[in-house]
Amino acid sequence: MKLKLSLPVKTTLACAIIFSAMGFKAHAQEVIGLQKAVDLALDRNLTIKQSQFSEALANEDYKQSKYNLLPNLTAGPQASFNFGRNIDPSTNQFINQRIFALNGNVSTQITLFQGGQLRNQIIQNRILLDANKSATAKAKNDLILNVVTTYLSVLTNQDLVKASQQQIDVSKITLDRAQKNFDVGNQTLADLSQAKASVSTAELNYTTAENQLELSILTLKQYMEMPPSTDIAIERPDISKISDVKTLFNPEDVLKTALAVNPDVLLAEVQQKSYEQAIKVARGNYYPTIVLFGQAGSNYSDARTLFGGSVNTGQTQVIGKVDGTNQNVVSPIYTESFSKYPFFRQLSDNFNQAVGLSLQIPIFNRFTARTSVRKAKIQAENAAVTTQLAKNNLSKIIYQAVWDVQAAQKSYQSATQTYNANKDAFNIIQQRYTVGLVNSLDYNTSLTNLNKSQFDMISAQYMVIFRAKVIDYYLGNPITL
């Protein structure tokens, strides 16, 4: 049985399917703005997660170094069955029987003095924790800069794709006009071929721009740890605010601020402090160690018995004779009684305690202490050089960045002037070409110059923004568009 649907019903179903498909597509496509791209990258980036794990480990080391100031407490219970001839652990006498023995002790100790190593280790571990935090901050800042750079590349390539499409449209209009003129005999075959070549060149430029756009979007997805198949749409900011971008900076002022906030320099300085603190830790090996200790223990043996006293058996025995009468001297016979030694009583009776001080004085340790101190000093000196290198490198980068942003602004101004000039020239040549006063070669050359100047102006426009954001990065300012 076939169900026939009326036209209104069919139309309604078709519209519902179309709207459902559009709604699914709109839902599947994720709109990504710059801030969202940065947030996703910071939240998902695996390098940052590794840095955070290192920071967490350093935090545990710092807490453990503080815990090392506390006394320790250990218990050592031991139970055994002994067979054959052995020593009763309770009486220290040889015995030839099976013995169940139980002994144990509880001990504690606390370090009173160790050359300041415990305290200095706490300080060093706190500095190392700060170093790991600086490393995490550096990884985040580097990632943010990469995301912003890639985001701007996507925007640039989008504009280049749009401009390339406009080139194709103009070239096709030109080809259509050339074809009509050729058909009526107003232009030669060379003019028509030149117009076709312009269309092909424009299409090639479009393909190149599209490939660059896809590559930049893929790179952005990788920074955000997104699957390559994820469908995203890039939110476009208002680039008309180009006039608000600051391009004039004093490099000394920028450098002064950057030295106080740049994560590379901060990381190098913190690591230098940690190596300087390591010298104090190593020097602690020269000093004696004083430890306060205490111990308590007891033991039990099932071979041990409890003496119950002497019992008169009612019998007598001769122990001698009386002189002169030769009369026997007798005495009663006694026997000793023993009973099972109770477990808890035996533990109580054998309970023992000890408390004391332990002093260890380093006299000769094969120069290991001296070597440790010397190595720590060398590492500290190397860290100081590393810190200075970081500052010198930052100084070079800052001066280069300030020069780059000023150069980018000049390039943008020149590119804009060139584009406007080529645009005016093309408009004139196009009018003259329409009435046959200019040949196709001059027309296509003018169109090519216009297209190239437009590409150059778009690239220069985004380059100004990018260079300005680099300065913001080194100043520690939030990077936004």
Image: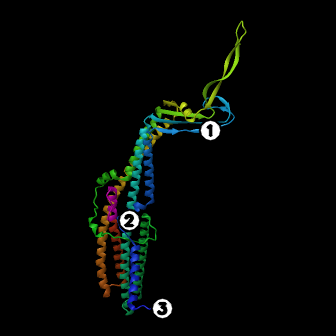
Q: How is the image coloured?
A: rainbow
Q: Position of residue 234 (x, y in %)?
A: 37, 70
SS of the residue at dot 1? strand
Q: Nearer the viewer, mark 1 or mark 3?
A: 1
In the rendered image, is residue 100 in sight? yes
Q: Nearer the viewer, mark 1 or mark 2?
A: 1
SS of the residue at dot 3? loop
Above or below, 106 relative to 35: above
Residues at marks 1 and 2, CA–CA distance in whole angstroms = 67 Å
SS of the residue at dot 2? helix
Please identify the dominant SS of the magenta region. helix
What is the magenta range?
A: 465-481
Instruction: Tell which of 343 and 380 is nearer to you.
Output: 343
Give the residue at mark 1: 80
Q: Could you tell me the amino acid type at mark 3?
A: Lys
Near mark 2 (Cα within 10 A), the count class, few <14, some 14-19 or many ≥20, is many
Give the residue at mark 2: 37
Q: Could you tell me the amino acid type at mark 2?
A: Ala
N-terminal of the pair, mark 1 or mark 2, is 2
Q: Residue at x 52, y 39 (%)?
A: 75
Near mark 1 (Cα within 10 A), the count class, few <14, some 14-19 or many ≥20, is few
Q: Position of residue 128 (x, y in %)?
A: 42, 46
N-terminal of the pair, mark 3 or mark 2, is 3
Q: Could you tell me the amino acid type at mark 1?
A: Ser
Q: Position of residue 71 (x, y in %)?
A: 46, 38
- List the single residue furthest toward the bottom: 184
Above or below, 294 relative to 209: above
N-terminal of the pair, mark 1 or mark 3, is 3
Looking at the rendering, which quadrant does residue 466 occupy? bottom left
Looking at the rendering, which quadrant does residue 322 occupy? top right
Give the residue at mark 3: 2
**In the image, residue 338 lies in the stretch drawn in magenta:** no
